[in-house]
Amino acid sequence: MKKFLALAIIAGFVYNCGHKKNGLLLPFFFLGSQHTATGGVPGNSGSPGVVFVPGDGSGNPVTPPADSTNNSGGSTTTPSNSNSGSGSSNSGSSGSSDQTSSNSNTSDSSNTSGSPSDTASNNSGSSNGGSSSSGSSDSNSSSNSGSSSDSGNNTASSGNSGSNDSSSSGSSNSSSSSGDSSASNGSSNSGNSGSSDNSNTGSNSDTGSGSNNGSGSGDSSGTPTVAVVVVEDPKGEPSFNYNTTINIPLNLTVLDKKSNVVSGATVLVYDENNNILFQGVSDSSGKVTGTLTVPTSVGNITIDISIGGESISQYVSLDSVLGINRTIRYEVNLPATQIADTDSDGVPDDTDIYPNDATRSTEVTYPAEGVFTVAFEDSYPSAGDADLNDYVIQFKNKEDLNSSGKIVRLKGTYQHVAKGAGYRHQLFIKLPVDVGASITYKLTQADGKVEVATNTVSVTAANLKSGYQIFDDSNKTIRGQNVHPGDVFKPGFVATVEIVFNAPVERAKLGSFPYDLYAYVLNTKQEIHFPGLYKNNNGTDKYLDNTGFPWAILVPGAWKYPYEKYDIRKDSESGYSEFNLWVSSGGKEYKTWYYDVTNESKVFPVPSDSSLLGYLFLSVKKFAIFYAMGLVIAGGIAVYFLRKKQSLVA
């Protein structure tokens, strides 16, 4: 069993390493277990050493109250390293301890448990079972004394005085001894006389108690602060318009301990499933800007900031968050280590998906796995029957970002999967950008047979703003309807569209995913867009009817849309009883209603994979009795000949 567990751990580690450029990033692998309780700003926590404070509106921290001494949730550390757990060594007998591991920050001090910032922090308390030691380093004196009790072979830190080099972020406590300790965020505690030579990479949480005063000071454990994050995120509730994704602007500024801007810091943002949402590099002003698009069901994101191969993490709850505006102020000396960057775009090779292409560095996929479904009601401007199956498309998009987080390439794959109406439709996409592009297009049948061979054309910004056609007449792009009970699922044509912009495009300019994807109804000559994009003259949403219901909806996954004439809003007809609960809550509850089919007889059995394999599976399912009878007959014949052969042998 132990061997099996060991192999499983090794396999998981190898998988993470092999997929690091898709979001499971090795430099941050060891930070995952360090998610701590929220500190001074609700909804925020981080890797040890990250302190969260509110801002004054200009990126400066508001001085916390005198009794608000621990904004980091009781957790501090240096930037990421290969041993992010406790780096302490405790012994109950005399002797020496020699522990080494690598880290770029070192400090010659026999005790460094105070704040590394220029403002010294004073801690006082009592110690039981330990003795004091003293030492000196270059600058920033502080006086620290913890309070703890000795238990067994472990001796907590005792009263220590000394001075601390601000580049250090760790502590070393030596009881009844003198020694030379070079530590970076680690500690060595011995209960009896002896000498200790430690160079550890880890974090130590002393059990001492005391108080720290001053902005950016460490927590009650006395371990120093690495970075103060000034949080000025706009809060509120987005207007509910049936959207299942949210667009969140990202604005970060990175500063060093002297408040100088830091350029070249790599910023990675990913969701709770390690799917990468954004990557960028701080510019000459220390700024990183971009836009995140996440499903409304995602509750948390992680922001990693890496400098010189070392990183810190922020864990952010998205509850009521409309944007992320933050200033990261480091309280330690930043490493000057040069990281391999073959194409010199500022993104290290180990996180650069295109390490030999300076024009792009990251690929963001929507969704990370599977597809999205967009379903249209085509009776606009009249209200529809809310069966959401008149024109149904499955699709996914990929964006290539450069080191500044701007989009250089957009690729989409679209498949027509249902047509529950007599009207004819076309599918378009509008991109409100100010640059032209080259577009490569291909159209195939579901089985891969080519309908329109791959071709590339150049288009202007005006062409993109007016709309680019993805699918022609819906009567020609699907062979059946796929909306009635008893229908066998027969997916339609697949269009592949690759748009390479003539110049990088800001995500905010391009618009939120899935951008302005819309249906054009040939019979009525009307466009049908998602809500939230266009307003009527009176300021109301142009694409919500008088009951507030949309003509287009985006749903994660290969969605099982309602059968023809089954109103999703009516309990007696809906296969999704949570849909109305989601609507009545304004989108705050039942955020994954589309995954919870409560009545399978009311929805079309769309396979999770709408490829030819899915089609064959459903064909077998529909004619299961005939296949079963055939298998029984074949089995009977096989048994007959087997017995006949055995009788001949006998």
Image (tube, grey):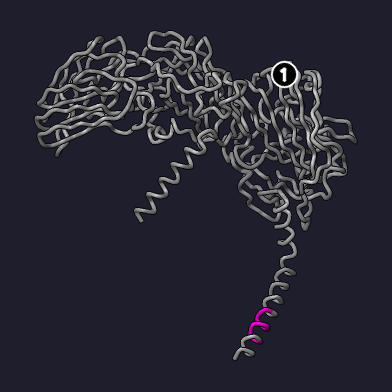
Quarter of image, res 105:
top left
Left or right: where 592 falls relative to 483: left
Q: Quadrant of the N terminus?
A: bottom left
Assess whether residue 333 is covered by the magenta stretch. Answer: no
**234 and 26: which is toward the camera:** 26
Q: Residue at x 83, y 41 (%)?
A: 451
Left or right: where 392 falls relative to 178: right
Residue lying furthest right = 523
Specify start and end residues of the magenta stretch as a single range. Answer: 638-644
As helix, strand or loop, the secondary structure at mark 1 comes to: strand
Q: Position of residue 206 (x, y in %)?
A: 23, 28
Quarter of image, res 109:
top left
The residue that label 1 is drawn on is 502
Q: Residue at x 73, y 27 (%)?
A: 499
**389 and 503: which is toward the camera:** 503
Q: Amino acid at mark 1?
A: Asn
**367 and 603: which is toward the camera:** 367
Quarter of image, res 405:
top right
Q: Position of residue 208 (x, y in %)?
A: 21, 27
Seen in the picture, residue 526 relative to 112 is either above or below; the reply is below
Seen in the picture, residue 648 relative to 352 is either above or below; the reply is below
Instruction: Assess disc 1: are there few (<14), some (14-19) or many (≥20) residues with their C-alpha within 10 Å of its C-alpha.
Output: some
Q: Residue 385: in sight, yes or no?
A: no
Q: Position of residue 137 (x, y in %)?
A: 22, 13
Q: Residue 31: in sight, yes or no?
A: yes
Q: Quadrant of the C terminus?
A: bottom right
Q: Main secondary structure of the magenta part?
A: helix
